[in-house]
Image (spheres, rainbow, N blue to C red):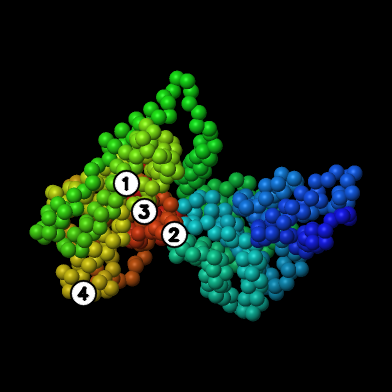
Amino acid sequence: RFVGASRKLVSRMLFAVHSIKRPPHRSHLMLSWMPELEKCINEYCAPTEDSNRAPNRDFRLWLSASPSPHFPISILQRGIKMTTEPPRGLRANLIKLYNSVSEDRFMRCQQRFKYRRLLFALCWFHAVLLERRKFKSLGFNVPYDFNESDHDICHDLIIVFLDEYPDNTPFDAMRYLIAEANYGGRVTEALDRRLVNVYINEFFTPLAVDPQTNFNLAPQMADSPYTIPNDADLPSCRDAIRKFPQSDVATAFGQHANADISSQIEESNTLLDTIVSLQPKVLHDSAESYETQMLRHCSTLQEQTPPAFDVRAIRTTMEPRADPEPMKTVLYQEVDRYNALLLTLHQTLKALELGVQGLVVVTPELEETMGAILDSKVPLSWSRCYPSLKPLLPWMQDLVRRITALQKWTFEAYPRCFWLPGFTYPTGFLTAILQTSARRNGVAIDGLSWEFPVVDVPAASITQHAKDGSYCCGFFLEGARWDYDNSCLTEPVPMELCCSMPVIHFKPVEMKKKTARGIYSCPIYLYPVRTGSRERPSFVISCDLRSGTQSSDHWTCRGTAMLLSTMH
């Protein structure tokens, strides 16, 4: 009852009330209408019960929404908020999936034994994909929102295939439709799709339906408790799941224990950054003033920042030299990009000094730069030349090293071994190597591919240039360690999250053979954020490395990759 209300407002409120008779109203999809709803709630829910405008005491308005910064704050403050958290852990996810399976559906398939075992494998596959996201970049390059509808579709698919082909189970068709068509339909990264296929090939095999096999779902885990129950009914499967450990170890996902440490460090850094951002900028009586701190930081950074390159002098020096023309072009491009960065640094630091002294107007961009410098972070305007997660001091040291590498190339000699992290665009440098090889050998550049021999010699000890291609150094291996004695990948040392790689010879070859067994195609990324950004992907190239005693699938589950830059 809404006495005295206009017909227009009544119709709007009735629309909101009517929404509770249907499935939960997704308010985040109707943000443009939320101000109208806010007015209705303020008008009809604010009066006391004695008022003739008050709603019935049994009236309730239910709204559901995903988090949105544009949702009206007054509605949140007035209402009682409830949230549904997704299950955490393999055990909780398996219990949730099996609780959603009815007895009728569980008994629908005619191939009972195969169905029960493959259903358990599918639930495990779904839970592993969901929980692997906790490993951040070591889990997936992109965090995907797999949901129960993906599982339900694949559940029906298993029933159909088993009933249609009772004598010969079509595992290849199952694996393709589950990993490529259904779950793979959400996957946008090729390397993530490779990981999904490794999991499906591991779980959906003839051994999974072999009655004589106690199929282990986590083969890399010693004394694994994760096995498929043998021909168990629905209650027995639920009881078996409840016996699984409540906390998950990294080896259950095929990961190393270091992956847990890495993800926890990343979560801790995010938490601390959030706490610091909420702290007020207050100085103690005995501390330096804000202006004194800023002037001191600016003076120190100006001393550390190298001067800009003299582009004309560089071109005059390089033109008569015998360096390959594509490599000269790369050098000129790199100099131009670093010059733009160095000029930005000098201009910004000078403007900050004048702004602190009150001689120029402090713009919002300068104010943002001040805050970043005081927090020892790299200002956004400085990070557009190349991506990095380093704090300000290591970032400046890295910048000086990059500039020094270009100066040595320009004024000393053509490098015998290139420091690949020093390039803002390493892909441009690699393309220049292919162009040089194609011109020297008189072949089309499209017909060239790569080989990656690992050179177990320090970069400083290389005395000659590569006959074809280039020697490159500066790689960090994450998710594995390089065995110098056997020249292959091996398990990392506990607590050693990254280790250095030896020199790699990037060698262009024509008509390369297919990748042999025992070779892991290791991706190389610019920095730890493997997705990069929309404007600047982080992926550079995939490098073939010997996988050692383990298979390539083992290192795929580990999330093994090489980085050109770390956080410190």
Query: Which quadrant is the N terminus positioned in?
Result: bottom right
Residue 285 visible here: yes
Q: Nearer the viewer, residue 524 or 17?
A: 17
Q: How crowded is mark 2: few (under 14 residues within 10 Å), some or many (20 or more)?
A: few
Q: Is residue 409 above or below residue 233?
A: above
**Which is nearer the N-term, disc 2 or disc 1?**
1
Q: Nearer the viewer, residue 292 or 524?
A: 292
> Mark 4 touching mark 3, by CB under 8 A?
no
The residue to which callout 2 is attached is 534
Residue 443, numbered circle: 4
The residue located at (69%, 55%) in the rendering is 35
Give the residue type at disc 3: Leu
The residue located at (25%, 54%) in the rendering is 336
Q: How far apart are marks 2 and 1 (CA)?
A: 23 Å
Classify mark 3: helix, strand or loop.
loop
The residue to which callout 1 is attached is 344
Q: How far apart are marks 3 and 1 (CA)?
A: 22 Å
The residue located at (45%, 65%) in the rendering is 190
Q: Quadrant of residue 429?
A: bottom left
Give the residue type at disc 2: Arg
Classify mark 4: helix, strand or loop.
loop
Residue 106 x, y percent position in the rendering: 72, 67
Mark in front: 3 vs 2: 2
Give the residue type at disc 4: Val
**Which is nearer the N-term, disc 2 or disc 4?**
4
**Which is nearer the N-term, disc 4 or disc 1?**
1
Q: Which of 316 and 355 is in front in this view?
A: 355
**Which is nearer the N-term, disc 3 or disc 2?**
3
Residue 335 x, y percent position in the rendering: 24, 53
Mark in front: 3 vs 1: 1
